[in-house]
Image (cartoon, rainbow, N blue to C red):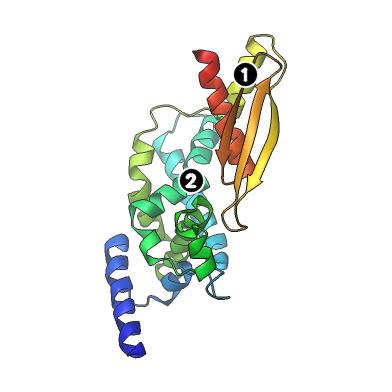
Amino acid sequence: MEAHRGRLLSEALSGWLAGVLDEVPDDTARYARALTHGSQSASNYERLEFLGDRVLGLTIADWLFERFPDEPEGKLSRRLNSLVTGPVCADVAREIGVPAHLKLGKQARDDGAASSDNVLGDVMEALIGAHFLNRGFDPARALVRRLWASRIDSQAAAPKHPKSALQEWAAANNRRPPDYVLLDRSGPGHAPRFRVKAAIGTLAEAEGEGSSKQEAETAAAAALLDRLSD
């Protein structure tokens, strides 16, 4: 019975991967590891995530360099930074159906790891790393380009980071630089939540949340910019 169940799970994974990768994988072992959380096994996605992060960054950087030949380094960097964030990787993971295939320990599943931006973002990068090891750089690059294509196409102009935009607003309006204060940290280690307040003196303030302090600060800055533009 256990062997039969294992075979069915392997076939289901292989079928899902064939749709994601646009090819039938010869070996699913690395992809299975990319989907395995540390709460389930010591043989998990962490090393593959490390590799996939670099493959993703290089692919996007090369793509932007090709796509926007007249843009300076600063604008290209802003585009890159907006496309490789944890939340973006997590959104891509959700779009291709990663949560249904995650291997999680019971506590991690009960704690909501299957919906965590941190976990899903890391797993997406791990899958890219696994594909790079299995098939090489060109197929890995093709995978990233296919999954990120709509996001590249939607960038009419280089996005400005909310914290940079808020800093510029403060300077242009002769206000003191924005302050960021951590208000709360909650959740388990694999799925933390941070709440931050951004303020410009006593003029205005706003709060934001994220799966890291940096993400929470970015969300707070964006919320404060919206408030200041009302």
In the image, residue 4 above or below residue 108? below
Q: Residue at x 45, y 70 (%)?
A: 103
In the figure, residue 217 lies in which quadrant? top right
Let me know if residue 139 appears in the view.
no
User: Which label's residue is closer to the chain start, 1 or 2?
Assistant: 2
Q: Secondary structure at mark 1?
A: helix
The mark found on residue 87 in the picture is: 2
Mark 1, other Cα within 10 Å: few <14 / some 14–19 / many ≥20: some
Q: Nearer the viewer, residue 119 or 126?
A: 119
Q: CA distance from mark 1 to mark 2?
A: 25 Å
Q: Secondary structure at mark 2?
A: helix
Say left or right for 87 vs 22.
right
Amino acid type for the residue under numbered disc 1? Glu
Q: Nearer the viewer, residue 224 or 95?
A: 224
Amino acid type for the residue under numbered disc 2? Pro
Residue 7, position in %: x, y?
31, 83
Name the residue beneath numbered marker 1.
Answer: 168
Q: Are marks 1 and 2 in contact (CB under 8 Å)?
A: no
Query: The N terminus is located in which quarter?
Result: bottom left
In the image, residue 229 above or below residue 148? above
Residue 90, position in %: x, y?
45, 50
Say left or right for 83 vs 16.
right
Q: Residue at x 35, y 83 (%)?
A: 6
